[in-house]
């Protein structure tokens, strides 16, 4: 399919990757730490470097922004992963600031997709971004004491820095964990805070961040008041505990802010307490509808650090499972999207039937329908039990193609669906790239960017498939692209099921304590919801020093306001359904 | 033409509706509350209604299904329970939620550890059923169960499983996981044979050195 697209930036004076340090000799230096890659940029020239990266070198897609607390060195580091929307491997650049009063210029003016991610870094690591339009906490509540991902911050029920805990063996006298370390023992409250008398504030900061519609006041002939509507946190359409604050003029949306964090459990802090292997089942619980893909991304990142590759058969098994996950996720997403449009439950239950059959496969292979925990570093946990390959064959050659056609016939030409979704929630390709949208949201806007093709991992370069792409960027196209992607996944699956070789499924001996050399790695896969990345920093110890998830559900919400403004309040729900978020991943 | 899509969609729904009745007639009396009926409804060429009427009907679980670990004991001749567990603590170390608590037995005279757990507790409230303990146990002593109906009225007193609650005979294990059991036994026989061969080889070499 067409791999060219209109780039957002005018490409003038094309620079090569190596030129970054020569172009800015005083401000950019290569990262020379062992196991690290990329460049270290001085904070005061960050905006210039980023602008040059985007405009002159073609790195127009800022995939991931995250931070690391290097406590022993006394520095905080912000790590940026930029890619070209035309494909290829990425470029890493970093900014280092002291731990006391850390300030970094915001990249939102250059890459608007950094918006939520910088807010997350401020929230969890306490780095201030100057020039950020709306630097509030995003996952924790306003007024929370401290920044959880700082290495010197410890959580309630904190027991030890790293697992395994010494209290469990050999003198493991049982106690419920919350009795051993009572909640109040390690809880800090902000100064003057009394939980007994505390009254939640009226979200003044949040409401003041709404665009308060200055244009409205100027342009409208009649003086009308705007109305602020809170949808959620408990709202049936929000797919979980998620809140959307919209400012309305009549029915028209003037401004919108998503509020999240109700399911926040600081997955990344848990990940730093865990050993590398122990994180594997925790990744299942990110996007709990597609746990196999989550396993895939994490395994890739750690394998990159360890420098190992799984054997052939394991690669095929991984691809089969990841593509089955994509199908099950997309049929579910389509079903639930129809629910959001008001087609109450008939389509979603039809979709669930196909998902059930795929989950049967997962259960037989991994032992669990949703929390699969199937991947290991250098392979998968077990081979296919008897009869499962035949079942997969029956699904991918016969049942699923037939059922997808039926779903298509049932829904695609339905007049109500078309009138509710065509031309609604439009995201242009330029916006989609700038806002770091990923996966179906990006491709429905006419950007044929799919990590499986753009930066192939595992054995995806062996399969014949097209990158599904649609060009209108509206809600209807985001529905259609999921049908397209299911069809492409079926193509991959048919090839994989036919070609799968016999052989071992694990590189070396299975180990419960893997040795991961010091360094950093960013592993990314094309998850069903978009680019799912894992950024891992190891210092050679059994527990990762930093474990970050680039969550597509979270970052795809960055352009949500752009999609909604100008549409009607009823479309908020439809547009959210078409982005397809899972709160387990959004809130982490 | 307007309305065509809706008519087509309703056609799909109608087809499902009719399919259910066709299947019911074809499998008259066998489609519900029977094992073959459930299997039919789980197969990839099933048509019509899909639902399993839990708890009257239950989906059969595959062999690899995992839910809450249990400890295996071998039945001795006089009915005594010989634990496979040596309290090496690997399961407790690998457990992601750290829900396994083990007290090792120490010999009262010498103070040296004895390969047997004195206490073994699992807090099933926080067990995440990942199966790592079973996967990495070198003695095949801890395995994942198939029994998923574990509701209790009182979680504080009932949901920390002690040794008594965790122990299940090896016969139960062979019943729920026949393939796994055969594989493990095979591996054990092979390992023992390899060890014996190595010993014999080492022994013969020693003898040649002696002579």
Image: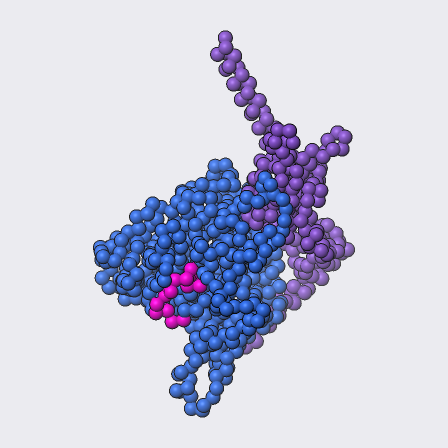
Chain colours: A blue, B purple
Residue pushed farthest front?
A: A192
Instruction: Tell me: B151 left or right of A249.
Output: right
For the residue pair A257 and A119, the one nearer the viewer reads as A119
| Residue B200 on the magenta segment | no
Q: What's the magenta region?
A: A121-134
Image x and y of residue A348, in percent: 59, 65
Is A258 left, or right, of B108 in this rendering?
Answer: left
Q: At which x and y percent is residue A55?
A: 28, 64
Please give the name of the residue rendered at 47% of the width and 51% of the height, measured from the top-left corner.
Answer: A272
Q: Is residue A131 magenta?
A: yes
Residue A104 falls in which quadrant of the image? Answer: bottom left
Give the residue displayed 57% in from the left and 71% down from the top.
Answer: A197
Q: Position of residue B48 (x, y in %)?
A: 67, 60
Q: Is residue A154 above or below residue A568?
A: above
Residue occupying the point 32% across, 47% down: A33
Report the number of discs: 0
Instruction: Locate the N terminus of chain A and report the quarter of the image it occupies.
Output: bottom left
* Image quadrant where residue B78 sits: top right
Instruction: State the residue in front, B119 or A361.
Output: B119
């Amino acid at each position: 399919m067409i791999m060219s697209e209109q780039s957002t930036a005018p490409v003038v004076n094309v620079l090569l990757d190596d030129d970054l340090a020569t172009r800015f000799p005083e401000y950019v230096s290569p990262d020379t730490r062992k196991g690290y890659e990329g460049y270290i940029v001085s904070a005061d020239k960050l905006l210039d470097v980023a602008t040059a990266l985007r405009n002159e070198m073609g790195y127009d897609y800022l995939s991931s922004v995250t931070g690391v607390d290097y406590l022993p060195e006394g520095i905080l580091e912000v790590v940026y992963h930029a890619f070209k929307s035309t494909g290829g491997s990425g470029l890493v650049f970093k900014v280092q600031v002291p731990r006391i009063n850390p300030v970094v210029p915001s990249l939102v003016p250059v890459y608007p997709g950094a918006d939520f991610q910088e807010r997350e870094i401020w929230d969890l690591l306490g780095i201030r971004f100057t020039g950020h339009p709306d630097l509030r906490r995003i996952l924790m509540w306003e007024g929370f004491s401290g920044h959880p991902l700082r290495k010197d911050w410890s959580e309630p029920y904190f027991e030890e820095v790293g697992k395994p805990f010494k209290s469990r063996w050999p003198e493991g006298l049982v106690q419920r964990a919350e009795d051993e370390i009572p909640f109040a023992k390690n809880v800090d409250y902000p100064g003057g805070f009394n939980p007994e008398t505390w009254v939640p504030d009226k979200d003044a900061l949040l409401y003041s961040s709404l665009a308060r519609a200055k244009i409205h006041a100027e342009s409208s002939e009649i003086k009308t008041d705007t109305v602020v509507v809170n949808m959620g946190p408990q709202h049936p359409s929000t797919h979980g505990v998620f809140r959307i604050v919209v400012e309305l003029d009549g029915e028209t949306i003037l401004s919108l802010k998503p509020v999240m964090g109700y399911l926040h459990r600081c997955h990344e802090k848990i990940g730093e307490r865990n050993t590398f292997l122990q994180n594997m089942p925790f990744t299942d619980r990110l996007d709990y509808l597609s746990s196999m893909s989550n396993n895939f991304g994490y395994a890739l990142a750690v394998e990159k650090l360890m420098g190992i590759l799984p054997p052939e058969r394991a690669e095929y098994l991984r691809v089969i499972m990841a593509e089955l996950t994509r199908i099950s996720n997309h049929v579910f997403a389509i079903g639930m999207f129809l629910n959001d449009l008001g087609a109450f439950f008939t389509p979603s239950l039809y979709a669930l039937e196909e998902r059930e059959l795929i989950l049967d496969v997962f259960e037989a292979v991994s032992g669990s329908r949703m929390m699969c925990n199937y991947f290991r570093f250098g392979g998968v946990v077990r081979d296919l039990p008897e009869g499962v390959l035949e079942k997969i064959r029956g699904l991918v050659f016969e049942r699923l193609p037939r059922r997808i056609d039926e779903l298509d016939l049932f829904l695609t030409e339905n007049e109500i669906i078309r009138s509710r979704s065509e031309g609604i929630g439009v995201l242009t390709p330029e916006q989609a790239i700038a806002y770091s949208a990923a996966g179906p949201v990006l491709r429905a806007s006419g950007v044929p960017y799919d990590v499986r093709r753009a930066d192939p991992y595992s054995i995806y370069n062996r399969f014949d498939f097209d990158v599904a792409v649609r060009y209108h960027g509206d809600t209807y196209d985001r529905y259609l692209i999921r049908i397209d992607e299911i069809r492409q996944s079926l193509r991959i699956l048919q090839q994989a099921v036919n070609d799968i070789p016999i052989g071992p499924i694990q590189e070396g001996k299975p180990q419960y304590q893997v040795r991961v050399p010091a360094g950093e790695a960013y592993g990314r896969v094309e998850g069903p919801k978009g680019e799912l990345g894992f950024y891992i920093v190891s210092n050679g110890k059994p527990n990762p020093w930093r474990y970050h998830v680039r969550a597509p559900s979270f970052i795809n919400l960055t352009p949500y306001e752009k999609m909604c403004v100008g549409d009607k309040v009823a479309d908020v729900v439809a547009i959210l359904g078409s982005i397809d978020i899972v709160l387990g991943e959004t809130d982490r | 033409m307007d309305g065509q899509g809706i008519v087509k969609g309703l056609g799909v729904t109608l087809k499902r509706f009719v399919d259910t009745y066709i299947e019911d007639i074809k499998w008259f009396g066998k489609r519900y509350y029977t094992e073959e009926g459930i299997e039919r409804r789980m197969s990839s060429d099933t048509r019509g209604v899909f639902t399993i009427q839990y708890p009257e009907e239950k989906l059969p679980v595959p062999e690899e299904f995992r839910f809450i670990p249990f400890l295996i004991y071998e039945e001795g001749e006089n009915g005594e329970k010989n634990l496979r567990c040596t309290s090496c603590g690997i399961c407790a170390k690998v457990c992601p939620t750290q829900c396994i608590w083990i007290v090792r037995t120490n010999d009262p005279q010498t103070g040296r550890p004895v390969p047997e757990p004195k206490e073994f507790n699992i807090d099933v409230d926080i067990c995440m059923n990942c199966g790592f303990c079973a996967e990495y146990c070198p003695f095949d002593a801890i395995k994942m169960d198939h029994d998923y109906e574990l509701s209790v009225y009182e979680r504080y007193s009932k949901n920390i499983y002690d040794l008594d609650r965790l122990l299940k005979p090896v016969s139960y294990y062979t019943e729920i996981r026949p393939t796994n059991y055969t594989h493990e036994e095979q591996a054990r026989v092979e390992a023992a044979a390899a060890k014996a061969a190595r010993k014999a080889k080492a022994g013969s070499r020693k003898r040649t050195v002696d002579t």
